[in-house]
Amino acid sequence: MRLDKLLANMGVGSRKDVKALIKKKNVTVNDAVVKDSGLHVDTECDVVKVNNQTINFQQYIYLMMNKPPGYISATTDNRERTVIDLLPKAYQKFKPFPVGRLDKDTEGLLLITNDGELAHQLVSPKKDVDKTYYAKINGTVTDADIQAFRNGLTLADGYHAKPAALEILHADTVSEINITITEGKFHQVKRMFEAVGKKVVYLKRIKMGKLKLDPDLDVGHFRELTKEELALLDVQQS
């Protein structure tokens, strides 16, 4: 990788800034002062320093966020607050994006990364990646609803949703359920319950594929995935 690209990617500055640092002899590779910003460096073994501080190259980041309500699942927006706004600049420099989306008022597990290949694998309709939600429903959820969800529901706009697994945790005038779907259509869980005459009043994603939301992660907080969690996503840590 070109030295100026590596340093720019790691937030040292623009390529113009990197050239200025090199001109001032503030950049070394393997303790040798660098004169060429286009020098090719091996990110696996070369030691790059700026002002005697080692720059550790990291290509990808993988963050678990417990998304708070009031934020949209986007990178930028002129009117709304986005989940990326919750990240410090140290992570924003990687140009991360949310994998899939959660509605503005929905909480819970959101994976944020800059690994486009992984994101494609997780959101591709062909992959049928499970997504599990905990929800509170205005209305008594019944065994008949379980069967209807298992058969696949036809939504108000005529779309026929794929079969979903519905688990009743507590049935009452406000029921508590878990639901597992393999799709991610706009407001899908809400629209599915509307199809059986009920309304979602609270929704939280708790699992995506094999990755579970950390119960100790407060709403609005995030952390990097552990090696074990990365393995669940079949991701090799760089």
Image (cartoon, rainbow, N blue to C red):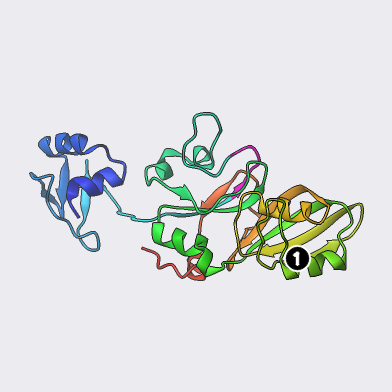
- Residue 102 is situated, as x and y percent measured from the top left of the image, at 60, 49
Q: Residue at x 63, y 41 (%)?
A: 104
Q: Disc 1 marks which residue?
A: 149
- Residue 150 is situated, as x and y percent measured from the top left of the image, at 74, 70
Q: Residue 67 in magenta? A: yes
Which residues make up the magenta segment? 66-71
Front position in the image: 171 or 47:
171
Q: Residue at x 69, y 68 (%)?
A: 163
Q: Is residue 226 visible?
A: no
Q: Is residue 234 above or below residue 157?
A: below
Front position in the image: 52 or 80:
80
Residue neighbourhood size for the residue with mark 1, other residues' Cα within 10 Å, grouped as few (<14), some (14–19), many (≥20): many
Q: Residue at x 57, y 67 (%)?
A: 129
Residue found at the very far left of the displayed protein? 35
Q: Is residue 131 visible?
A: yes
The N terminus - image quarter: bottom left
- Residue 208 is situated, as x and y percent measured from the top left of the image, at 59, 62
Query: Is 142 displayed left or right of 126 in the figure?
Result: right
Front position in the image: 60 or 170:
170
The prevailing secondary structure element of the residues shown in magenta is loop
The C terminus - image quarter: bottom left
- Residue 154 is situated, as x and y percent measured from the top left of the image, at 72, 59
